[in-house]
Image: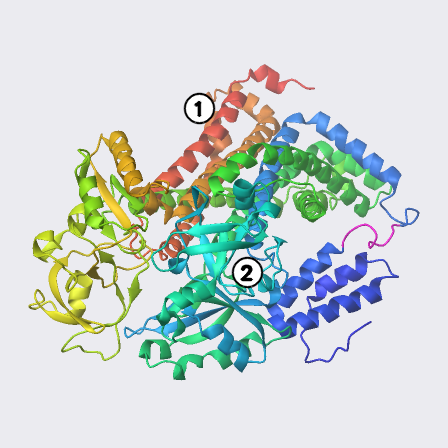
Amino acid sequence: MRRENPSDRSQPPQWLLRFFRWFCHPECVEDIEGDLLERFDLIVESHGEKKARRKFAWETLRLFRPGIIRPIDVNTSSIRPAMIRHNLLISYRGILQDKSTFLINLTGLSTGLACVLLIYLWVQDERLVDAFHEKDEQLYQVRSHRQLPSGYTDTWDIMPALLGEALKEQFPEVEEATQFSSEEENPRGVFSYGDQGFPAQGIYAASNFFEVFSFPLLIGDSKNVLADKGNIVISEALAQKWFSSPKNAIGKTIEWEHPFLGGVFKVSGVFQDLPSNTTEKFDLLLSLEVFLDAFDWAREWNGSSVETFLLLKKGTDIARFNERISPFFKDKSPDENIRRNTLFVQQYSHGYLYNRFENGKLTGGRIDYVYLFTGIGLFILLIACINFMNLSTARASTKMKQIGVKKTLGITRKSLINQFLCESTLITLLSGIIALVWVALFIPTFNQITGKDLVLTFETQLILPISLIILITGFIAGSYPAFYLSSLAPISILKGKFPTSLGELLARKGMVVLQFTLSILFIVGVLVIHEQMDYTLNKNLGYSRDHVMHFKRQASDYDPEVFLGRLKDIPGVIQTTQIASGSIINNPNKGTGFSWSGQESEADLMFLRPQVGYDFVETLGLELIAGRSFARTYGDETSKLLVNEAAAELIGRKNIIGRVINDGDFEKEIVGVVKNFHIKSLHEEIEPCIIRFSPRGRDVMVKIQSGREQETIEAISQIFKEFHPSYPFTFGFLDDEYERLYASEIRVASLSKYFSLLAIIISCLGLFGLATFTAEQRKKEIGIRKVLGASVRQLIQLLSADYTKMVLLSIAIAIPIAITLTHLWLQGFAYKIPLKGWLFVLATASTFLIAALTVSIQTYRAASVNPVECLKDE
């Protein structure tokens, strides 16, 4: 049924609509088109025109399949079976006649297609993260913007527990609201069954968690598995490991040791192991009420501790909804910082790819890498297609008489185009088969580099895109030679005149220039990324992370000082300390609540505020520039503070040692100033930091003597087991944790290195093929020049001059583009390398030398041939 079509209504892409009407069976056009347009209108109303147009394009392309495509009339079609067989035979003979060109094209296209297919698998996996939930299009996460006194707007996703139900009651667009605990508040530690304990990662979740999120329950009712505070829901893997089957797990009791939240919980349900494409990682779930009952502050409007998710009704205008909820906090809390929060929602499945906010504006995220690698894959394939086009048009003289005779006998241009496209498609199909073999062979290595778990499966949703990629590649690769060669005049051809026009030569040279321009961009990008990563991983962060072990001290009734003292007695231990929340790497403890006399702004300022123990400065090697550090000789240091230089600037450097400031309701004295150090990644500026003292931190850091790591770790492990007999000893090192902050950039650097190498190899393959053909075309000229006394060196210069000019032009074009693109990428780092000239010199020089070597090898062979061989007739 067709929709109405008023002039003011949004329209789908018309070229796609025409394409659909062209391929669709006439009997199905009207019904299917009506459904497509109706679906388009619904998506426009609920998600906007941009998403509706993307969905329309995808759904239209998915319809291009057997059963819907209109039948071909072989009696009237120019693509008759006999003609297809003839074209395939001609293509096969052409391949046998010119094996070197065929092998170059096959290698280039198969390599390019393999890159595209690997990147396609990776991109699809990225796009499907968190998108598997049944109500994905209705599922939104609540976030907030908070304007800081500095004027910068920060973005948060940790909300008060009261928010979910309040939004559901006040806004009719909200069908359901659910919540689960933030990363900092999640239940951790060892859960035990009988006399066996096991470490597990859990979350506190609202009772309707399984009704909103599509994590399948193998056993249990989604409505009541978390209704009782004494219930616990575990994963299939845990049920299998500890109870031999999910069925046996139901009704069993699991004990959790924790000073405030621990207790005995009954297994009420078992959920299917989480898919790899989910950002939420947990082994078990406890009721959110357990957490809220233990901490009264969590039930207040200024007690942010959970992430909040909404199921919105279909057709909700998201922009309008965001406007309505934006000022929601203005009258909810006496805390000025909470009242300054402005709420908004973001589709949950978009949060993985679109997660970078700068000053309150969404500026990208992992989607940048999706765009980057999609572009890289397409560029590599384009380079391979250019090789095919150039070699096909360059070798057109071998097919001239064939084309001339066919045209004289009445063969239409359309038939000739079909012949050339048939040849290019045949080679592309063969390349596609080889590419699939390469993908199957290299996908384990690709998974290792990317941290993915990709699998090449020949399912419908994968076969269709792969087939389209191969067919489109065949058309693009063969289009230029097909349309160019089929346009030649038969009279000129039969007279032996090959009409090499200026435009044709410029186009061919232009494609070579484009190839090497892209190759230089790849090489420059790899060098800049490598230099930035080297700078990042080796930069002095203001503290020493070498040989510093980090592990968690589990909750037990013992004095932490006794435990740390035992560790310090180990011969290989230099120093120990503790921190209350996480390691020093990317410490999440940030907030307000500090004030002092003479403060310029009445609004609360935001500070990093880690809580640490004795010997923190000494263990990490922080530079103390004034005052002292926390020390046992001064007794309990709870009323003392350390600040970094950035915080000292805000508070006022003059007479800062001994100055008293307010930490909430408590007065505390500043006893030391440390040099600025990086708590977060180099993507962010160093922030003001106030270091507080806590005698009972859970995270322990141990500085180990170099060269004695193995025996020291073993000794630490033994002492840990003495104090925590039922807990496994797991540890890491700060340098490894620091590298994990840049996992994405390191993977980009690694992948870019391989892709740039492939790009330059494919480009040189094409250049080698063109140089070979040029030498064959000019072999009589070479023979005459040798007879007249030309040296091999002079002949090499003559034959390679054109290619040298093209590579130099590529360098001239690529350098300004490379400077612009690398500068934009480096803007994502607050601390970055300067763009050094040698990076560009190295990239261009290496490209030039590789290209020159490729051409010189072939031209030397041609110039060294005996002139008698060059001058004799066939």
Q: Is residue 144 left or right of residue 245?
A: left
Amino acid carrying mark 2 in the image:
Ser
How far apart, in angstroms, are the residues tagged by discs 1 and 2? 63 Å
User: In the image, what residue occupies the spot 10% across and 56% down?
Assistant: 635
The colour scheme used here is: rainbow
720 or 153, nearer to the observer: 720
For residue 149, what is the image quadrant?
Answer: bottom left
From the image, tell me which residue sits under label 2: 349
From the image, tell me which residue sits under label 1: 793
Q: Is residue 754 left or right of residue 839?
A: right
Residue extending farthest right: 75
Amino acid carrying mark 1 in the image:
Arg
User: In the image, what residue occupies the spot 83% across and 39% down?
Assistant: 84
Circle 2: element type: helix
Per the rendered image, the range of residues in magenta is 64-72
User: In the image, what residue occupies the spot 83% across and 66% down?
Assistant: 31
Query: What main secondary structure does the magenta stretch of the protein show?
Result: loop
| Category of crowding for the residue at label 1, using alpha-carbon neighbours closer than 10 angstroms: few (below 14), some (14–19), many (at least 20) | few
Q: Is residue 498 left or right of residue 747?
A: right
The location of residue 584, given as percent across then percent down, is: 27, 52
For residue 331, what is the image quadrant?
Answer: bottom left
Please say if the residues under marks 1 and 2 sit with CB atoms less than 8 Å apart: no
The location of residue 606, given as percent across then percent down, is: 27, 69
Q: Is residue 834 above or below residue 646?
A: above
